[in-house]
Structures are given as C-alpha cells and as structure tokens.
Amino acid sequence: MVYLEINKTNYQNGKPKLIEKMNKYLSNKDAKIFMLIYMEGCGPCNETRPEWSKLKNILSNKFLSRQDVVMVSLDRDIFGKLNNANKEPMSFPTIRFMTDSGKKMETYEDSQISNKDRKIDSFIEWIKLKTGENNITISEKQPRVHKFNKTHKKKRYGRKSRKQTGGKWSAKYKRSINCNRPKGFSQRQYCKYSRKK
C-alpha cells in the first residue's frame, strides 16, 4: 500500500513530485485508490483526517506491501493539479474510491458498508470490500493499551486497600473518632455498627 499526504505545505516546499506520483497511479488501470479530499479549517475534515492517517499504522505488513493500493490525503487546493480531476468535490471531507484509471468511482457515503461513521473500523471495512482482501489484520505496530479489570486497585502508601464503611466520611476523619467518647449521634452509630473491633 502506498500512503501519500499531499498538502499546500509539502507541495510548496519542493515536493510537486508527489502530484506526479499520484498522476502515475491515476493513469494505472489496476490501481485501487482511496482518496480523502479535505479543506483546511473544516471541522469534520479535522475529525476525519487523524482516523484516516491511522490506516498506515494499523494495517498489516502483508497488506502494506501491496503496490496496487494507494491511500491519499489531499488538500482541496491541490486537487485541480491532478490529471483525472474531472469531478470537483462539492462537500468536505469527500472520500472516494477510484479504479480503472479514474473511470470507476464511488464515494464513501454511497458504499455498501454497514456503518459510515468515518472511523478507522469503517475505513477498514470499506477497504476490505473494495480490495477483496479479507485478511487485513491489525498490525503489531500499535502500542498496547493496558486494561485493568474492576478488581485492580492501586495501593496507597504501602497499606493494603480495605473496604470503607460509614458513608462518605474521609478515612482521616474516621481515624480521628474516639469511640470511648463519641461526639454526637453519628459518631455513636459509627462506633456501634461500622467500626472494626
């Protein structure tokens, strides 16, 4: 898989060859191109772009080694420089799949996937559908997220955690209660029922 990020900054900083590279893929009949066209300052675009860029880190190495699949993130101001830029996007972000030298095109919103929420899982489902690749497995490059079960509790100051009773009183307040001389009804009840003997 080839991942291209084409924006105004890298285009103006001497990387117009990215457009040449993209035009080469657009003229290739066998290339399967997934294109995100965004506009700077667009709120929905800013939410979608990070999810789109996760694809290069999440897809398996076997899938990433394919040269016929191209993922592109493209600024709308650069879109006109493409050879097959015949259909200008009307809304942003526009997400398209193109093949057969740009003659066959489908937008993400018109696809047949079940959930079109512009999240990484939906993008993977769409890629599977369009490439016919069923074993796009998650890469092991992703950082592991440690999940703790409900019984996991942090120990404080080296003491064992214990169940607190007696309402929302702080542990410090509970230790300060003198059960030989309780002050008031609440402290008497605490000493009578909740205190460990």
Image (cartoon, rainbow, N blue to C red):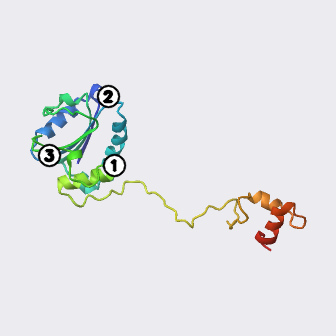
Q: Calculate the distance from the C-alpha at mark 3 to the C-alpha at mark 1.
A: 24 Å
Task: Give amino acid for label 1.
Answer: Lys
Q: First in sequence, mark 2 or 1: give its number.
A: 2
Q: CA distance from mark 2 to mark 1?
A: 26 Å
Q: Residue furthest bottom?
A: 197
Residue 187: horizontal and vertical position, in percent? 82, 63
Query: Mark 3 is on which residue type?
Result: Ala
Task: Describe the element under mark 2 as helix, strand or loop.
Answer: helix
Residue occupied by mark 2: 9
- The local crowd at label 1, few if under 14, some if 14 to 19, many if 20 or more residues have their Cα within 10 Å, is some
Residue lying farthest to the right in this orientation: 181
- N-term mark: 3 or 1: 3
Tell me the residue that label 1 is attached to: 119
Residue farthest toward the front in the current orientation of the protein: 185
Which corner quadrant of the image does residue 192 belong to?
A: bottom right
What residue is disc 3 on?
A: 31
Residue 17 horizontal/vertical position (percent):
21, 31
**What label does residue 139 carry, if any?**
none
Q: Is residue 82 left or right of residue 5?
A: left
Of pointers 3 and 2, the one earlier in the residue sequence: 2
| 176 left or right, relative to 142 | right
Q: Residue at x 33, y 30 (%)?
A: 40
Q: Secondary structure at mark 3?
A: loop
Residues packed near mark 2 inside 10 Å, few (<14), some (14 to 19) or many (20 plus): few
Amino acid type shown at disc 2: Thr
